[in-house]
Amino acid sequence: MTTPPTPSGTAEHSRFGWSLATLLHEWSERVGAAADDLPQGTRGYQLLTAVVHGDLPSQAALASTLRIDRTVMTYLLDAFEECGLVERRLDPADRRARRVVATERGREVLAATEARVAAAEDELLTGLEPAQRAQLRTLLEQAARGTGTQEDPCRTVIEATTRVQEDGAGQRPPSPASR
Amino acid sequence: MTTPPTPSGTAEHSRFGWSLATLLHEWSERVGAAADDLPQGTRGYQLLTAVVHGDLPSQAALASTLRIDRTVMTYLLDAFEECGLVERRLDPADRRARRVVATERGREVLAATEARVAAAEDELLTGLEPAQRAQLRTLLEQAARGTGTQEDPCRTVIEATTRVQEDGAGQRPPSPASR
DNA sequence: GCAGATCGTCTGTCCAGCAGACGATATTAC
DNA sequence: GTAATATCGTCTGCTGGACAGACGATCTGC
């Protein structure tokens, strides 16, 4: 309170990460609120979106797309199935796999949620002109897509998996920079 | 593998959240790797950046800016102090508070890290033209700043606090949408 | 048919993050 | 002065969620 924490800061020193994190955090909250009739809030919304709009063949595909562990995906889908929002069907082509499809109600609920989410996102992007919002969306998508792999969709899966492992290994706890 | 998981998707259905999450995730990895001589990887980098470039008066201010719990901030800073990167000094104006300042070495290390981070960020934004990258950065910052509060920096702190609590409450586990 | 890989599930473990309490200090009211 | 209340940073304890690993079922290639 004594010193106003300079909200705009001195920096052109790459507030990039901070902006990203802040925006995602805020997005997550608002969307979580808008999607509170779904299990798991934000994550549930993303899952249902992926199920309905993305044509992902299996739980594994869903998991890697959403960067969710396989074992987590299991009980996440359990919750959705309990609510009657999605169904697991045996994949006739591969009986190990389950095809995850939305129920009629799932699609309805998602549609209703999406409307609220859109409103929430717009509210989130107050501070930007409508034209800028569209621009931001476009750039974000393009950047995110250009991120992992440009052409080979299979590599996305592989990378996503291995990346997570590297991540864990990267968390080296001790001896950072000999004092 | 059978069905290529449509990486571009069918949707103009707000891949916004997904893009944000993906980009942040990838950013976090790359920056974590670039900052592996700092404790806590990505988070450590952000902390040190805030300490050096942001003029944050107290641990509490740092914590709320970075959306980190106070108790977490304690041992995070412990680690940094052990490495000789920052120091906690008694604030002469308020002896409850500690002013967190970077050591000479802290500033050096940060400078070196920042160079690598900048490279990593650029690599991350492959897929965007240089002009677009700048544009994305600008839009992101603007959006992130417009997010919480436009004018009153103190509210940021308050909101950050209460938001977290709401968040927890929002995680309602059962009975989402009567089946 | 067999070996190896993959899918989804289950179990057990572990740890980061939080709530809560605490001493120290500041601030305000009386 | 001092009493009451709020804030700062620290510590302790607990808990929820994510992961590793093992498993049965199935597919694929040989």
Image (tube, coloured by chain):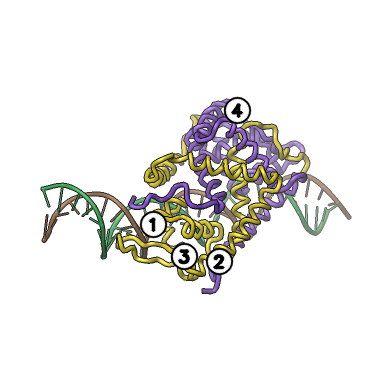
Chain colours: A purple, B yellow, C green, D brown
Observer-nearest of A118 and B165 = A118
B55 on left or right of B94 = right
The answer to whether residue B112 is seen in the rendering is yes
C1 on left or right of A9 = right
Q: Which mark is residue B109?
A: 2
Q: Cα distance, mark 2 to mark 4?
A: 51 Å
Q: Looking at the image, do the residues carrying marks 2 and 3 touch, with CB atoms under 8 Å apart?
A: no
* Residue at 57% in and 49% down: A16
Q: Give amino acid for label 3.
A: Ala
Mark 3 falls on what kind of element? strand
Q: Earlier in the sequence, mark 3 or mark 1?
A: 1
A161 on left or right of A119 = right
Q: Which residue is mark 3?
A: B102
Q: Where in the figure is residue A177, as x and y percent of width and height?
A: 55, 70
Chain ID for label 4? A
Which is in the foreground here, disc 1 or disc 4?
1
Observer-nearest of B17 and C2 = B17
Mark 4 falls on what kind of element? helix
Q: Earlier in the sequence, mark 2 or mark 1?
A: 1
Q: Where in the figure is residue B117, as x and y percent of width and height?
A: 61, 57
Q: Cα distance, mark 3 to mark 1?
A: 13 Å
Q: Which residue is mark 4?
A: A107
Which is in the foreground here, disc 4 or disc 3?
3
Q: Are marks 2 and 4 on the same chain?
A: no
Q: Dot 3, how many residues are within 10 Å of its Cα: few (below 14), some (14-19), or many (20+)? A: many
Q: Which residue is mark 1?
A: B57
Q: Give amino acid for label 1.
A: Pro
The answer to whether residue B33 is seen in the rendering is no
Q: Cα distance, mark 4 to mark 3?
A: 53 Å
Which is in the foreground here, disc 2 or disc 4?
2
Observer-nearest of B69 and A2 = A2
